[in-house]
Image (cartoon, rainbow, N blue to C red):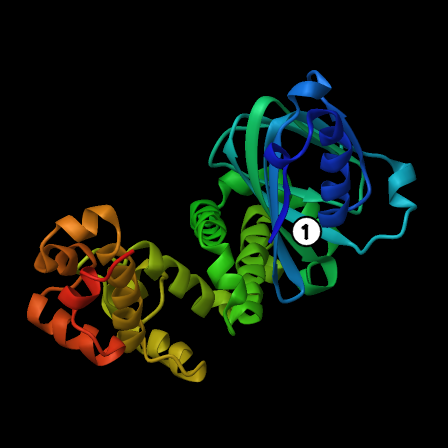
Amino acid sequence: MQLLDTATIAPEQRVEAFRAAFGQASVPCRIEHLGPDARVHSRMHLWHFGSANLFTTDASGFRLVRTPRHLRMESPPVVALAVQTSGVGRFRQFDAEALVPPRQLMLSDLTAPYEFSWVDTGGSRAFHIPYVRLSLPPDVVRRGAPRLRASPLHDLVRDHLLRLAADADRLSADAGAATLGTATVELVRALLVSAADDERLAREVREETLLTRVLAWARRHLTEPDLGPVRIAAAHNVSVRQLYKVCAAAGVGLEQWLIAERLELARAELLSPRGRRRPIAGTALACGFHDPSHFARRFRAAYGISPREWQQLPH
């Protein structure tokens, strides 16, 4: 859902519109624009995934300041995990300050004062999670927040958020949106426990989030032909038997899930400018299928149309 596009608003109204849109999506704070009011520009979107939401901002330079006074205003306890998509952010909380370059994650605890800014232009994709859904003590959250880069889960969670944001309109409208939100919360929880190096919680969280981490990891490697149960199990330090057991408990048939995900990838690729020019066999191989004939049969069985017919559909 689009909250704001300043291209449709008169320049003298943009500052107020920016503050109103930000207030709708986040917690109370003070906003300072780092440039002339006439040059303020922004696009903001908000999508709901169950009790969590995804808030995206692309804007000219600004600073957010959340003070003790803002904390006394009524707002739900929330944490926000954000990936910087452009520009360099500057973040300060709990007496620590850090620069946030593009493709790096940042976690802010919105139950405490903080400052965040970027100059010129920048972009951010922030997943807001109610504290109660995160199910972690504040001390674990605050220990893990400045150490996200140290976790081996950093890139996996970052890529998941970027993919979520890239297709948010379709995903948020799907019947599984709330479940997808729950899975994303589990990934964030695992990331924080890993970053905090809290062995007390690590084993419990690893077990609870194994399936979520497995599926997120597999989506990143769908195009690789050797992706299968043996490789997935090895990447997550579990046996193939344990992997199948976890999948079965959740009603997931791993091989069929991999095929379905690859078919969805191929379906989107066939309608892309590159996919419309490429032979069907090339798309099949690029999406992880060994045998183009097997791909064609699976595609027709799933969608009731051949890959060639789908590729030739008008835009």
Query: Which residue: 54% across, 63% down?
Result: 172
Q: Position of residue 212 (x, y in %)?
A: 46, 66
- The foreground one among 313 and 305 is 313
Circle 1 Cα neighbour tier, 10 Å, few/some/many (<14 / 14–19 / ≥20): some
Left or right of 124, for residue 281: left
Locate the C terminus and report the quarter of the image it occupies. bottom left
Residue at disc 1, secondary structure? helix
Left or right of 261, for residue 49: right
Q: Quadrant of residue 19?
A: top right
Count of numbered badges drawn on the protein: 1
- The foreground one among 108 and 282 is 282
Q: Is residue 257 above or below residue 310?
A: below
Label 1 belongs to which residue?
A: 140
Label 1 sits on what residue type? Val
Q: Position of residue 145 (x, y in %)?
A: 63, 42
- The foreground one among 168 and 288 is 168
Left or right of 139, for residue 209: left
Residue 43 in sight: yes
Locate the N terminus and report the quarter of the image it occupies. bottom right
Q: Position of residue 304 (x, y in %)?
A: 23, 79
Query: Which residue: 68% across, 64% down?
Result: 133
Residue farthest toward the top in the current orientation of the protein = 36
Q: Is residue 249 above or below residue 117?
A: below
Residue 203 in sight: no
